[in-house]
Image: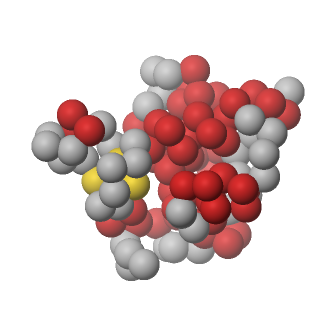
Amino acid sequence: MPSRLIDYISIRPEMQSGQPCIGNTRIPVEVIVRAWWYTTVSEEVICNNWGITPQTLRIACWYWGCYRRRTKIGHAWTDWAERNEGLMWLSEYEMVSLPSRQADA
């Protein structure tokens, strides 16, 4: 498991055309974010389906809220990402609840 927050997200031109991916996988962060935003399935199901940890799901959502603000999802999560930034950088993931999602509305 990565020890630093920035190790959870990789951006490499030769992988997925430079889209942000989960760690060293070919799973785009956007796929994980959309799985949370558009569905009503549980955190556990998403993590099991994609082979990620709950921490990785939170980091993917946080990344999207911080760096993809121009998207519908990123804009909705901006405040959540800013409120939880300190905990994320301190690796206190278990203290961070997941952001709201469209399916909850």
Q: Residue at x 40, y 42 (%)?
A: 28
Does 28 sit left or right of 59 as displayed?
Answer: left
Left or right: 45 in relation to 19: right
Residue 96, position as x, y percentages in the image:
68, 62
Q: Picture quarter containing residue 79?
A: top right
- The relative height of residue 71 versus residue 22 in the rendered view (above or below) is above
Relative vertical location of residue 7 with respect to residue 59 in this rendering, above or below:
below
* Of residues 38 and 98, the one drawn nearer to the viewer in this rendering: 38
Q: Does 84 appear above or below 89?
A: above
Q: Residue at left 59%, top 34%?
A: 34
Q: Residue at x 50, y 22 (%)?
A: 71
Q: Is residue 66 visible?
A: no
Is residue 90 visible in the rendered image? The answer is yes
Counting from the top left corner in percent of width and height, residue 32 is at: 54, 44
Looking at the rendering, in which quadrant would you find the C terminus? top right
On the image, the x and y values in percent for residue 12 come to 18, 47
Q: What is the quadrant of residue 38 in the picture?
A: top right
The number of numbered discs placed on residues in the rendered structure image is 0
- The residue shown at (33%, 43%) is 20
Q: Is residue 10 above or below residue 103?
A: below
